Image: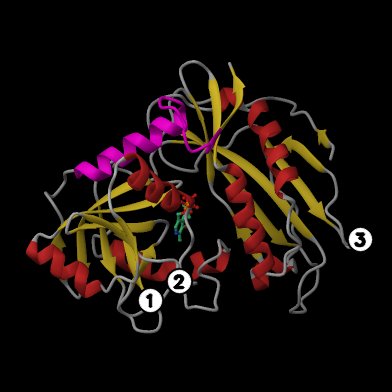
Amino acid sequence: MSITFIKADKLKQKPDKVFGFGKTFTDYMYVREFGPDGKWGEGTIRPFDAVELLPCSSVLHYGQAAFEGLKAYRNEKGEVRLFRARDNFMRMRGSCERLCIPPVDVDETYAALVELVKLERDWIPTERGTSLYIRPVVFADERSLGVHAAKRYKLIIMLSPSGAYYANGFAPVALKTEREYVRAVKGGTGAYKVVGNYAASILAGELAKAQGYDQVLWLDGVHRRYVEEVGAMNIFFMLDGKLITPALNGSILPGITRDSVIKLARESMGLSVEERPIDIAEVLDGARSGALTEVFGTGTAAVISPVDRIGDNGVDYIIGEKGKVGKVSAELFDALTALQTGRALDVFGWTQVICDR
Ligand code: PLP
Ligand code: COI
């Protein structure tokens, strides 16, 4: 696999400090196209800029598109680490298969990412809680209106120096259970990271925000009672001294942070972890009785995101002490970010140092 490099005429001014999520992009991106010859062509690293799409491009009409989210971290020593990057590309392959997109090769895409991140290493912030957010996206670019698997696609990897996903950083957020709309059903696309899932969730998210909540807590699409996940995170509950999270049931995204937290909690913190169906009534009962001591979401962008309030049918349930981060959430946040930045020894083999200055 060879990558052509197209040099930018002028490099951008790097920000002194990074805030927020996904607002600034680095100088370069990686682009690879799948053509009517039925093959992925060679990739290019080229200046981050607009890509040409005709108004009839099939992604705009039928949404055949999948994406990923992962991060690179740089520490004070200058070491740059990727975290479970191959797992993201494997999940992307699954998303592609679900949408009839010709899968992108995991090793080739990983190698391209390493090249791109090395080139852009000076963009990676080092301050605590910051990282380089990596957004690969693959989409159909058929230039006609028939509904069928396209014959042309584009894969793009863009890089965005980012701070905390939520405006308040590592402070608790509020969730609202969604009783009217559903995000996904088994047999649909909920277990894949495809763009339509997010389009389908925006209305409920906006309604929740208008009512003073940060995100939606989705319930299952059939019984409307089992907890699934949050808009951009998986969800965990500390209930009766055990850490529980919904079992992967075919309509929940198998989060890489979720998997990492389960292993860290079991193997490094000695917690008892259960993956099983969780009735929302059990969560609310736990909040009423005090058996529910902590709730947090997990995700690449959100890392560990404590939850101190759940609204359900107009009633607010406070978890733990309002505005305070729980002990388990704080410990997991520390353990995970220590691994990701190289402050702790990675006994799981999840990180790869891709440059050391
Ligand atoms: N669930 C949804 C719907 C998401 O968008 C994300 C974010 O990627 C997650 C869960 C968490 O997945 P991961 O930990 O792999 O980032
Ligand atoms: C991520 O955590 O990487 C995500 O993709 C969530 C995103 C939808 C903001």
Q: Nearer the viewer, residue 62 or 243?
A: 243
| Position of 205 relative to 313 (above/below) | above
Instruction: State which tag comes first along the sequence, 2 or 1.
Output: 1
Q: Nearer the viewer, mark 3 or mark 2?
A: 2
Which residue is the site of mark 3? Answer: 37
Q: Secondary structure at mark 3?
A: loop
Q: Earlier in the sequence, mark 1 or mark 3?
A: 3
Q: Secondary structure at mark 2?
A: loop
Quadrant placement of the N terminus: top right
Count the marks: how many?
3
Looking at the image, is 33 positioned above or below residue 357? below
- The chosen color scheme is secondary structure
Q: Is residue 13 visible?
A: no
Q: Which residue is found at the position 34% from the left and 58% from the top? A: 235
Say which amino acid is labelled 2: Asn
The circle on residue 249 is: 2
Task: Please give left or right for residue 213 compared with residue 314 in the image.
Answer: right
Which amino acid type corresponds to the residue marked 3 in the rendered image?
Asp
Which amino acid lies under the numbered mark 1 shown in the image of this protein?
Asp
Which of the marked residues, 3 or 2, is nearer the chain's N terminus? 3
Q: CA distance from mark 2 to mark 1?
A: 10 Å
Q: Which residues are magenta?
A: 325-351
Left or right? Give the position of 30 relative to 201: right
Q: Is residue 174 above or below residue 25?
A: below
Left or right: 100, with 207 as reference point: right
Residue extending furthest toward the right: 37
Q: Element type at marker 1?
A: loop
